[in-house]
Amino acid sequence: MPAPIRLLHSTPAGGPALVVTGPLPPSPSPRYPGELLALLARDHLAFFARLEACGDVAQLRLGAQRFVLFGHPGDLQRLLVTKPRTFARGRGFERATPLLGDAGLTADGARRPLHRRRVRPAIQRDRVAAYAAAMAGHAERATATWGDDTTLDVHEAMTRLTRAIIGKILFDLDVGDDPGGMEETIDLSLRTYRRALLPLGTLLERVPLPSVRCVQCARRRFARWLTDAIRARRTLGDGRDDLLTTLLRARDADGRALSDAELRDEILALLVAGHETAAVALTWTWYLLSQYPNVEERLHAELDAVLGDRLPEARDLPRLTYTRMVIAEAMRLYPPVWIVERRAVRDVEAHGYRVPAGSLVYASPYFVHRDPRWYERPDRFDPERWHPDRADARPRFAYFPLGGGTRAGIGEQFAWTVQIVVLATIARRWRLRLARNHPVALEPLATLRPKNGMRVDVLSRTSGTSSPSDRG
Ligand code: HEM
């Protein structure tokens, strides 16, 4: 049992509420010297699994940096919701800034609420439902070349599709074919994140290694493309009604418009946050459906009953309940944002332990969503858990694939809608089967990507059940 926490004194209004003393949380002991550092460099999921095994709060100090993992929904609520001033954005956001820009949307401080207010109307419930038909059109066109002999990487296909959807719907930009090389920038920046967490990681980033230079080139290339697109829209000055137009018209308190660079960073933040996560979520959903034919069958039954031969529209969304349950369950098992990070700006208490200021504090939907205290047979893909008639006795933060609190994913409505519509449009006509011998593995970068992509054989629902790999 940890010793009781002693609360020493309160500080003036607006300052830190309490100074906390108490024991530090338990740490994992390495199985061999350097094990945990090696895991941090190589395999983030394994690193955090070692922390998670220590209990609801665990910590590890590597060099000057302390890593703390919270695992109990009560502590997560405090981390994400009730103590926003105790935790600032983490190192991931900080390290991503030179690569992905410095959007007010994701910043700490005064710029942030203003930016959220500007962007929110474009991606709130009513508006997003109205995008459903356009999303379905994109998904239908993306599968126009599919046939019974097609084998493809569904992660690549979903990335191209969600990028095209978000680019076109929110900004009227054609980014489906990745004209500015955005994907390379994202890919490289997700990879450098792991290096940035290592002791001396910040220093490593300043060394002009070929990999660091390559990240900077990719970033410059995409930034140039996006700046040209923004300038073209400024000169056009047309009366479109999309988010880019809203941002072009936006003025701050001093009447100042956003500069090209500021606009570019806002657009980039939404494009990246929106399409990378939705593509990963859909990829794992396809994988799970290919492994659970009984779930797939029920999904098809709902799609046949609700849609028949037509594409989904806004009015169908409330009736696609099983489709939504499938997506909820897939995001439980494979939450695209598998870990959320903050930096404690003052000492804080969690579960009777003291978490010192300066610690990097983590909450992982991946581990919490698989905790047997909240989920019976947690490894099983069972969409019935999310049946609307089933009383949810779980604590609020036993499920948080879209985060929560002050930094909650602003795109929550968009995220649900795009997944439901894309899944319904494609599953209406196609089954996807994991290609024979495809090695499924996790690649826990900032998002939970499939390490080797996800090769699948495509089967039309009207054809038999054997896939090209079975036949070959
Ligand atoms: C399946 C899809 C999605 C998932 C799983 C997801 C998940 C998340 C999570 C967990 C966070 C919180 C990160 C944190 O607390 O540090 C977040 C933040 C964010 N999301 Fe999403 N998201 C998705 C789709 C979208 C979409 C479609 C958009 C926009 C169109 C979007 C925009 C954002 C933004 C701007 C933030 C940063 C908010 C901030 O820092 O205040 N997301 N998302």
Image: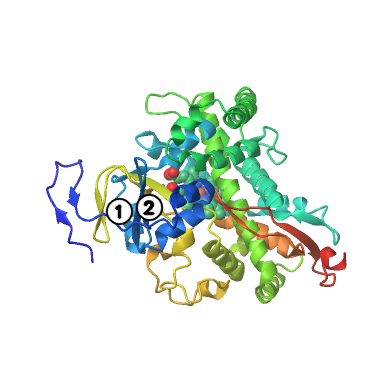
Dot 2: within a 10 Å radius of its alpha carbon, few (fewer than 14), some, or many (20 or more) residues? some
In the figure, residue 436 lies in which quadrant? bottom right
Q: Which of marks 1 and 2 is nearer the N terminus?
A: 1
Give, as a three-letter code, the residue at label 2: Gly
Foreground pick, 298 / 369: 369
Q: Name the residue under label 1.
A: 82
* Label of residue 405 in the image: 2
Label drawn at residue 234: none
Give the quarter of the image for residue 420: bottom right
The residue under label 1 is which amino acid type?
Answer: Thr
The reply to whether callout 1 and callout 2 are in contact (CB within 8 Å) is yes
**Residue 324: percent from left, percent from top:** 58, 65
- Can residue 116 be seen in the rendering of this structure? no
Q: Which residue is drawn at 83% across and 70% down?
A: 466
How far apart marks 1 and 2 lie (CA) works out to 8 Å
Instruction: Kindly identify the residue that appears in the image at 51 percent across and 27 percent down.
Output: 207
Q: Estimate the x, y position of residue 148 in percent, counting from the top left.
A: 85, 62
Quick one: quadrant of the C terminus?
bottom right
State left or right for residue 169 relative to residue 336.
right
Mark 2 lies within 8 Å of ligand 1 (Cβ measured):
yes
